[in-house]
Image: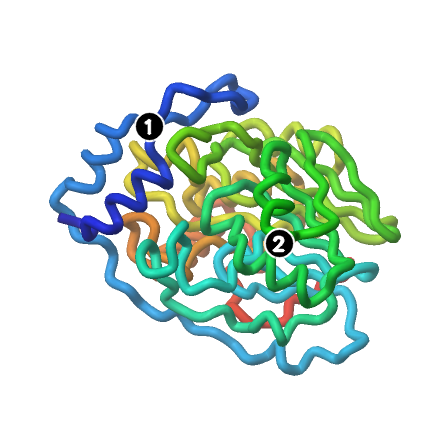
């Protein structure tokens, strides 16, 4: 058996199919997998991938207090971003597990390279959807306590999860809604995914990506997604982001994951659809959520770039902790 019984139980809470569904993807699909399909995957006789610690960097410690126009991959889908205007934190998870309970569920292979106390003052937090590896209430509470003025942008349907935990300045967003703060305008864009945290709330809240724009710089964070035409639509409506943050991991087995998680080749296609000249990988090397070897995503990413005759810096997979410059 691939995973422990505890993990099976957590996975059921995390991904089981129930009848009551609200939101759909733009292709009119709800990305539902039956409990039987889930069990076929979990009990397929294959062991899960070997846990491996990926290489990290301490370069973030060189950040100056007044430094601007940079990003640091903290782990999974969590990026610290300064866009020349404000400090933004994406899908923050600093907990040891991506789970509704603290003693079981997917455990980190690497710690967050920056602790909550290492962060600069965060002006704005964006959350792509409510899965436990993207919406971590413990981390959001801590961020709210560190700076009560921090603004939290979440998909429509998720606001109460935060406000019931005492988190302030929470705003819900529907697809194509805009929110402006300082000189930055954020748009919530469609991606192909789904939502769920409990037994009876599948697709009761939305999911999406974040387009973040100032007059000088446009950034895009795809959250968690399968491949779809949504990225071409995003480009048509909002233009090309100068830099994009795109998932490259959690993609096998394809029969189960394809609708919800892109592989590295599809991630490159997303960057092409967005006409984004520079992209950074994420969503790998932090938690073992799926079957591909831990170290495979960046290897396949490099090969995908070669196969399409694209420059190596068109799409890179940085080390957690590296300082990434965000300048035109």
* Residue 33 circle label: 1
Residue that sits furthest to the top in the current view = 28
Q: Please name the residue shown 42% across and 61% down the image.
A: 286
- Would you say 122 lies left or right of 53 here? right
Q: Please name the residue shown 62% across and 37% down the image.
A: 155
* Residue 233 circle label: none
Q: Position of residue 8 (x, y in %)?
A: 24, 45
Disc 2, SS: strand
Residue that sits furthest to the bottom in the current view = 62
Q: Please name the residue shown 41% across and 50% down the image.
A: 100
Disc 1, SS: loop
Q: Please name the residue shown 57% across and 52% down the image.
A: 91
Q: Residues within 10 Å of mark 2 (few under 14, many from 20)?
A: many
Per the image, the residue denoted by label 2 is 90
The relative height of residue 285 versus residue 160 in the rendered view (above or below) is: below
The relative height of residue 125 versus residue 20 in the rendered view (above or below) is: below
The image quadrant of residue 81 is bottom right
Q: Position of residue 18 (x, y in %)?
A: 36, 24
Q: CA distance from mark 2 to mark 1?
A: 27 Å
The relative height of residue 97 versus residue 178 in the rendered view (above or below) is: below
Q: Position of residue 151 (x, y in %)?
A: 74, 52
The relative height of residue 162 versus residue 316 in the rendered view (above or below) is: above
Could you tell me which quadrant the C terminus lies in? bottom right
- Would you say 128 lies left or right of 185 here? left
- Would you say 141 lies left or right of 306 here? right
What color scheme is it?
Answer: rainbow
Task: Note whether residue 228 is visible.
Answer: yes
Q: Residues within 10 Å of mark 1 (few under 14, many from 20)?
A: some
């Amino acid at each position: 058996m691939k995973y422990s019984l505890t993990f099976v139980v957590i996975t059921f809470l995390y991904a089981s199919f129930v009848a009551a569904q609200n939101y759909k993807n733009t292709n009119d699909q709800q990305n539902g997998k039956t409990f039987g399909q889930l069990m076929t995957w979990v009990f397929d006789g294959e062991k899960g991938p070997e846990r491996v610690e990926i290489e990290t960097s301490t370069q973030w410690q060189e950040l100056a207090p007044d430094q601007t126009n940079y990003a640091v991959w903290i782990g999974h889908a969590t990026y610290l971003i300064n866009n020349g205007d404000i400090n933004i934190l994406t899908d923050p998870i600093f907990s040891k597990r991506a789970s509704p309970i603290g003693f079981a569920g997917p455990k980190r292979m690497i710690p967050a390279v920056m602790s909550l106390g290492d962060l600069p003052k965060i002006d704005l937090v964006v959350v792509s959807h409510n899965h436990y590896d993207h919406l971590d209430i413990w981390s959001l509470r801590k961020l709210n306590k560190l700076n009560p003025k921090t603004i939290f942008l979440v998909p429509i349907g998720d606001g109460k999860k935060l406000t019931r935990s005492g988190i302030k300045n929470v705003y819900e967003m529907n697809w194509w809604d805009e929110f402006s703060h300082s000189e930055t305008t954020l748009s919530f864009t469609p991606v192909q995914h789904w939502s769920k945290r409990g037994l009876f709330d599948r697709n009761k809240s939305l999911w999406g990506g974040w387009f973040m724009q100032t007059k000088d710089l446009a950034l895009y964070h795809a959250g968690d997604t399968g491949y779809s035409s949504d990225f071409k639509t995003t480009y048509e409506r909002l233009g090309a982001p100068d830099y994009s943050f795109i998932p490259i991991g959690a993609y096998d087995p394809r029969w189960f994951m394809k609708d919800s998680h892109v592989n590295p080749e599809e991630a490159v296609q997303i960057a092409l659809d967005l006409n984004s000249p520079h992209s950074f990988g994420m969503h790998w090397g932090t938690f073992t959520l799926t079957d591909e070897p831990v170290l495979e995503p960046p290897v396949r990413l490099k090969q995908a770039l070669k196969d399409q005759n694209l420059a190596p810096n068109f799409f890179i997979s940085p080390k957690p902790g590296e300082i990434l410059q965000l300048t035109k």
